[in-house]
């Protein structure tokens, strides 16, 4: 039996589609509302992964694990949730995988777990983590969670790790990276000079299955279509949505004002902030990620061009907006 944690999330749902397309039965874990995706090969099960006994229960008859469960947030108000759900949950999953003696695990880490600094960086899988004020709470939580997987590997766990870049694709446009599309649709006027890696959610799911089905273990892989500036990505989104692209450069001083105003807005409205101190800081960094290791391991693999990903997102976004209006 294949176990997928975080199966109701953005990446988890895409991974399920990839697995059922290959006719693989899956035990899919969620923690609140049962997802709409239903299929004879999917066995949905509700579980609190912070509960050791619940984790033990969902591991029954499991041979392969995709550990996708995590919280992604750059809001300091979510610090405790990030530590609990990203680090402690991974401890429980790794420990149970070791106790159960599963065949293999694929863990979803992040490029954020590789650390950041104020200077331009060229990062590959051998880059060492460096403590820096540029590292967000989310980055730290993913770094320490990944360390738990390496600890498991040292204790005999057969596992491999993927470090996806910023994941783009169709999803909930009110949260996560998909929210960038909503911001651009509202003609948010600011852009930064930051550079980051970007990748299609479908590519991440395909890569994870390829890695699981291979003999590769005790390795980590950056998954990234390429390195693009936030301005390039926002401009491409605006083009596909036929709206005005951001045109005002957000200097560090201006960004500090914007995130503070958005903080006040979020506290008044009760909605999550669009921009936080940490996300504003992250968007200024210039990080260049080397995606060659995975392509060398799987020469036939091809990443979806960023323009194609964003065009697909824009089409889906327009359909959803029109549906809401009707």
Image (cartoon, grey):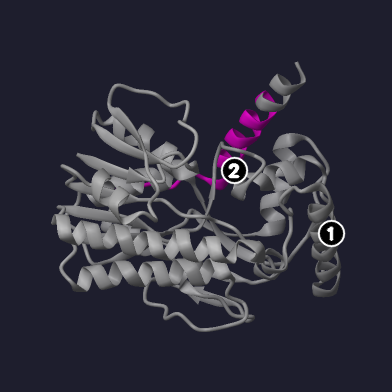
Q: Tell me residue 311's x, y (percent).
A: 61, 36
- Observer-nearest residue: 295 or 213? 213
Image quarter (top left, top right, bottom left or bottom right) of the C terminus: top right
The residues bearing labels 2 and 1 have C-alpha atoms spaced at a distance of 34 Å
Task: Classify 10 Å Cα crowding around label 2: few (below 14), some (14-19), many (20 and above).
Answer: few
Is 303 magenta? The answer is yes
Q: Which residues are magenta?
A: 300-319
Task: Give the farthest residue toward the top.
Answer: 326
The residue lying at 47 percent from left, 26 percent from top is 36
The residue lying at 60 percent from left, 49 percent from top is 176
Q: Tell me residue 3's x, y (percent).
A: 27, 43
The residue lying at 56 percent from left, 76 percent from top is 116
Image quarter (top left, top right, bottom left or bottom right) of the N terminus: top left
Disc number lying in front (2 or 1): 1
Residue 133 in which image quadrant = bottom right
- Magenta-drawn stretch, dominant element (helix, strand or loop): helix
On screen, residue 72 versus residue 5, left or right, reads: right
Residue 38, relative to residue 233: is it above or below? above
- Find numbered disc 1 in the image and state the secondary structure of the residue it sits on: helix
Is 109 magenta? The answer is no
The residue lying at 66 percent from left, 32 percent from top is 317
Name which of mark 2 and mark 1 comes first in the sequence: 1
Q: Is residue 100 visible?
A: yes
* Residue corresponding to mark 1: 264
* Residue contact at pointers 2 and 1, CB within 8 angstroms: no
Q: Tell me residue 40's x, y (percent).
A: 29, 21
- Find numbered disc 2 in the image and state the secondary structure of the residue it sits on: helix
* Residue corresponding to mark 2: 307
């Amino acid at each position: 039996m294949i176990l997928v944690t975080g199966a109701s999330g953005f990446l988890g749902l895409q991974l399920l589609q990839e697995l059922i397309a290959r006719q693989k039965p899956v035990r899919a874990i969620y923690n609140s509302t049962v997802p709409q995706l239903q299929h004879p090969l999917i066995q949905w099960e509700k579980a609190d992964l912070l509960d050791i006994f619940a984790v033990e229960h969902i591991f029954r008859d499991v041979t392969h694990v995709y550990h996708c469960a995590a919280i992604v947030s750059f809001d300091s108000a979510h610090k405790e949730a990030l530590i609990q759900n990203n680090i402690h949950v991974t401890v429980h999953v790794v420990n149970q995988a070791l106790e159960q003696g599963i065949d293999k695990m694929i863990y979803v880490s992040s490029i954020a777990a590789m650390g950041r600094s104020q200077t331009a960086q060229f990062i590959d899988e051998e880059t060492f983590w460096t403590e820096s004020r540029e590292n967000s709470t989310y980055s730290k939580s993913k770094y320490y969670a990944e360390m738990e997987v390496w600890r498991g590997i040292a204790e005999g766990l057969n596992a491999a790790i993927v470090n996806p870049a910023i994941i783009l694709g169709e999803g909930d446009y009110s949260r996560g990276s998909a929210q960038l599309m909503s911001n651009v649709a509202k003609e948010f006027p600011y852009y930064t000079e930051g550079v980051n890696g970007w990748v299609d959610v479908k590519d991440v799911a395909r890569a994870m299955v390829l890695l699981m089905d291979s003999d590769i273990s005790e390795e980590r892989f950056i998954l990234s279509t390429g390195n693009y500036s936030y301005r390039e990505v926002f401009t491409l989104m605006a083009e596909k949505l036929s709206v005005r692209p951001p045109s005002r450069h957000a200097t560090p001083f201006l960004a500090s004002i914007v995130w503070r105003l958005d903080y006040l807005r979020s506290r008044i409205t009760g909605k999550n902030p669009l921009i936080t101190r940490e996300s504003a800081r992250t968007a200024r960094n210039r990080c260049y990620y080397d995606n060659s290791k995975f392509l060398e391991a799987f020469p036939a693999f091809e990443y979806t061009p960023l323009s194609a990903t964003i065009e697909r997102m824009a089409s889906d976004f327009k359909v959803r907006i029109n549906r809401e209006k009707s």
